Amino acid sequence: MWQAKEIKEGLRTRLIGRQVYCFDEVGSTQDMAHSLAAGGVLDGCLVIAERQTQGKGRIGKEWVSPEGGLWFSLILGSSLAPTEIPALSLLMGLGVTQSVISETNLPCLIKWPNDIWIKQKKLAGILIELSATEIEVKHILVGIGINVNIEHDLLPLRATSLEIELGRKVSRLSLLINLLERIEELYLQYQEARSLLPFLEEINELSWLNGKEVRVKGELTTAEVSSINESGQLVIKLPGGFLETIISSEMITISSLR
Ligand code: BTN
């Protein structure tokens, strides 16, 4: 079971983890974070659970969250505009990728826009939600799920875990501390730059989709993924060499895994 004291003692952060709420079982840490945010908790609050019974993925999908994973949400103040959410999501993906590589050396990559993959399987996902009134965004809720010490038969088909990839268990506490420290650094740097530009080269080096062939839904021709741009959009190269930007992963299908 997660212990708030242990997490706080390990953290060298100013913002992230100023308050830590640990649960054995929740429906979803995102929902818990929504309620805590409404109740006025501090910016940087961490909500973490051992298991989620109704873990939420993107676009209404279920997120399988048995014991052994890292399932948490962060409550961040609303200094970012809603239009900056794609950038924030990629930054969080960068943080997850950097920390997994530094803790395990596994070749994980950012699969635009919100996933972390190892080869052809999903290791982690990021869900960003806004807590807003009719007139303003109050908080940004960053939900991160990483399959850490979970066996194959407990996961969906196209998912993997660090334990499966390494053949041994990994310290979840050490991964969590590493990740939260990176997230804080990236988030503070972003708040100063207000642009993805300082991070773009590394994001593109770690992009799973770069060079892959995709098809824009409803079109017959395929295109090659060129890069991720500073707004966090995907840039693809059409057959004539024309570049097109894609804002949502729902707009494309991946036609080759080459
Ligand atoms: C996705 O890839 O679809 C996003 C998955 C996000 C899962 C995390 S686990 C912690 C937090 N609580 C949730 O219910 N979802 C996010």
Image (cartoon, helix red, strand yellow):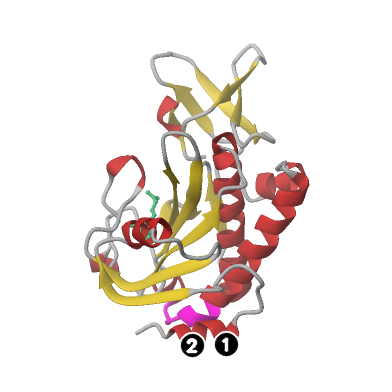
Q: Which sits in the foreground, 79 or 184?
A: 79
66 on left or right of 230:
left
Residue 133: x percent and y percent? 42, 40
Compared to residue 86, the image places residue 110 above or below, namely: below
Circle 1: residue type: Glu
Element type where label 1 sits in the image: helix
- Whether residue 67 is visible, yes or no, is no
Label 2 lies in ligand 1 vicinity (Cβ under 8 Å): no
Front residue of 209 and 86:
86
Q: Residue 40: which numbered mark, if any?
A: none
Residue 91 spot, x, y in % from top left = 61, 51
Q: Quadrant of ligand 1?
A: bottom left
Label 1 beta carbon within 8 A of ligand 1: no
Q: Which residue is mark 1?
A: 9
Tag 1–tag 2 contact (CB < 8 Å): yes
Q: Secondary structure at mark 2?
A: helix
Q: CA distance from mark 1 to mark 2?
A: 6 Å
Q: Which quadrant of the figure contains the N terminus?
A: bottom left
Q: Residues within 10 Å of mark 1 (few under 14, many from 20)?
A: few
**Residue 51 relative to residue 123: left or right:** left
Which residue is at a point 29% across and 67% down the rendered structure image?
152
Q: Give the residues in magenta.
A: 167-175
* Residue closest to the eye, 122 or 258: 122
Task: Tell me the amino acid under the disc marked 2.
Answer: Lys
